[in-house]
Image (cartoon, rainbow, N blue to C red):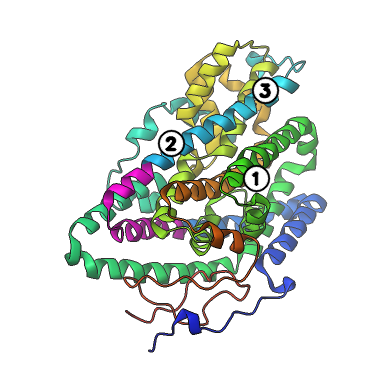
């Protein structure tokens, strides 16, 4: 098969709006809300549709993370640069998390929505489903996220879907593959080709995104009902408004520093944002975020290392939720906390929040672990927010996702590994030339670019 120079490839035709994936995901979300509202029993019955799609996506997350990180690290000439990228990313993650938590603390201290609830911890009862999460949170130790990094076996993290452990294995394997030099060439070539195949499978699965969003949204509304939204509507509203302010003010300022427009970036990522809104989890959007950031001019090694790591260590939405919910429970149970105690609460949350993204009910477990570790606020008080946790999870996931996109751009700029001019053009929806293929990777056959002008999830491998 003859390779075609990307420069000679025909310009892709943009799809009409009614053929775009985001349009059908949006329609599916609206239909899901209507079905769950008008016929709750039917909405609850749609649960398998949503969970099956999410399961299919999670099936691919670990292989994609592993292959992308290994390929990125193995192809870097200077391993010290990889280490510095990791240090810079973790530094940014911690600063971002602290700012997010402070934002939540300030909001709940200003509006004090828990005052007047006068909940008695001795009379609060936990449901069976909540009790399992509470127990998991109470048994979680603050240092576990460190010791949990090392898996019991090589294949265990892939079976259990543990992204943190997959990242650990991928970094070690990628460094070793880089260190052996030419001997590892065939392995690196196989990694790149296998990456192409996995992304092709992902492309097939993504065609079912509207069904997944419909099932997940119909179940959420049918199970928990619109009445749940109104019972603690003020707390939900405060969380959403606080999160929006964090995105547009804090993250928007970071984007302005990079000379990029956050609104343009959000429009560029609209398909992923709608998918997260419908499924209440950011994991299905991880592979597409990596591909789109690469297309926007961020280097593959930086994307491969920062994005997956950020999914466990850069949880801006979860940070806002933890601080806001913890203080709401304290106010509702008449537990007075001094400024010093709130700072201590923040310090504990910095540790208990890590790794929560990859666990079912992770935000709820992290909240329980925080209250149990601190010992000042009654842990059973989390039942006061359990009913609305599902409706807050969408916002958590959206902010986590946006925060990771901004973090990757910032670290890439810090490293000098992003084409800001290209990113600005891509975010604005302007046509840009395809990226030149890495000679070390399989080339991509012309015509495989997405019809909407954005990068296809994968092309056809033609050999090297």
- Identify the mark at residue 394; answer none if there is no mark: 1
Percent position of residue 378, x then y: 58, 17
Region of the chain picked out in magenta, as a range: 59-86
* N-term-proximal mark, 3 vs 1: 3
Q: For the point 58% across and 33% down, which residue is it?
A: 100
Q: Is residue 84 magenta?
A: yes
Would residue 318 appear left or right of 228 to someone viewing this image?
A: left
Which quadrant is the C terminus positioned in? Answer: bottom left
Local SS, label 3: helix
Question: As rendered, which of 145 and 214 lies closer to the eye?
Answer: 145
| Location of residue 331 by image quarter | top right
Q: Main secondary structure of the magenta part?
A: helix
Please indicate, yes or no, whether residue 132 appears anywhere in the rendered image: no
Percent position of residue 412, x then y: 45, 51
Percent position of residue 158, x then y: 37, 53
- The residue that disc 2 covers is 91
* N-term-proximal mark, 3 vs 2: 2
- Identify the mark at residue 156; answer none if there is no mark: none
Percent position of residue 361, x then y: 55, 39
Local SS, label 1: helix
Question: As rendered, which of 98 and 259 lies closer to the eye?
Answer: 259
Local SS, label 2: helix
Give how far apart the Cα atoms at labels 2 and 1 are: 26 Å
Please indicate, yes or no, whether residue 446 appears anywhere in the rendered image: yes
Q: For the point 36% across and 55% down, which residue is it?
A: 69
Residue 286 vs 239, above or below: the answer is below
* N-term-proximal mark, 2 vs 1: 2
- The residue that disc 3 covers is 328
Q: For the point 53% across and 56% down, which residue is it?
A: 420
């Amino acid at each position: 098969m003859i390779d075609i120079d990307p420069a000679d490839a025909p310009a892709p035709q943009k799809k009409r709006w009614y053929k775009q994936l985001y349009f059908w995901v949006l329609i599916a979300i609206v239909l899901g809300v209507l079905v769950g509202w008008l016929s709750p029993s039917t909405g609850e019955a749609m649960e398998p549709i949503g969970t099956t799609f999410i399961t299919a996506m999670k099936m691919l997350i670990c292989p994609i993370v592993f292959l992308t990180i290994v390929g990125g690290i193995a192809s870097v000439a200077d391993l010290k640069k990889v280490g510095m990228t990791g240090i810079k990313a973790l530094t940014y993650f911690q600063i971002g998390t602290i700012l997010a938590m402070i934002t939540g603390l300030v909001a709940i201290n200003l509006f004090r929505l828990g005052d007047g609830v006068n909940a008695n911890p001795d009379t609060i009862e936990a449901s069976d489903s909540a009790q399992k999460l509470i127990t998991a949170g109470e048994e979680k130790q603050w240092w576990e996220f460190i010791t949990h990094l090392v898996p019991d076996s090589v294949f265990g993290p892939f079976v259990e879907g543990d992204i943190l452990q997959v990242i650990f294995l991928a970094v070690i394997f990628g460094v070793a593959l880089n260190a052996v030099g030419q001997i590892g060439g065939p392995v690196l070539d196989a990694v790149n080709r296998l990456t192409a195949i996995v992304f092709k499978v992902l492309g097939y699965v993504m065609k079912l995104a509207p069904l997944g969003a419909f099932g997940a949204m119909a179940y959420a509304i049918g199970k928990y009902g619109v009445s749940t939204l109104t019972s603690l509507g003020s707390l939900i509203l405060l969380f959403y408004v606080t999160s929006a302010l964090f995105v547009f003010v804090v993250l928007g300022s970071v984007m302005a520093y990079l000379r990029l427009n956050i609104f343009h970036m959000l429009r560029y990522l609209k398909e992923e944002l709608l998918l997260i809104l419908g499924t209440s989890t950011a994991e299905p959007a991880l592979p597409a975020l990596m591909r789109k950031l690469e297309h926007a001019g961020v280097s593959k090694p930086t994307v491969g290392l920062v994005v997956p790591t950020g999914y466990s260590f850069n949880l801006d939405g979860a940070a806002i939720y933890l601080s806001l919910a913890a203080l709401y429970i304290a106010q509702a149970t008449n537990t007075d906390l001094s400024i010093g105690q709130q700072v201590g609460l923040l310090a504990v949350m910095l540790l208990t929040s890590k790794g929560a993204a990859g666990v079912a009910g992770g935000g709820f477990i992290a909240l329980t672990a925080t209250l149990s570790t601190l010992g000042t606020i009654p842990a059973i008080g989390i039942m006061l927010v359990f009913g609305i946790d599902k409706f807050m999870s969408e916002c958590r996931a959206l902010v986590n996702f946006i925060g990771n996109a901004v973090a990757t751009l910032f670290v890439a700029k810090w490293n000098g590994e992003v084409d800001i001019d290209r990113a600005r053009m891509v975010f604005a929806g302007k046509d840009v030339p395809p990226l030149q293929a890495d000679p070390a990777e399989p080339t991509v056959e012309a015509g495989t670019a997405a019809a909407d002008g954005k990068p296809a999830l994968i092309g056809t491998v033609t050999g090297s």
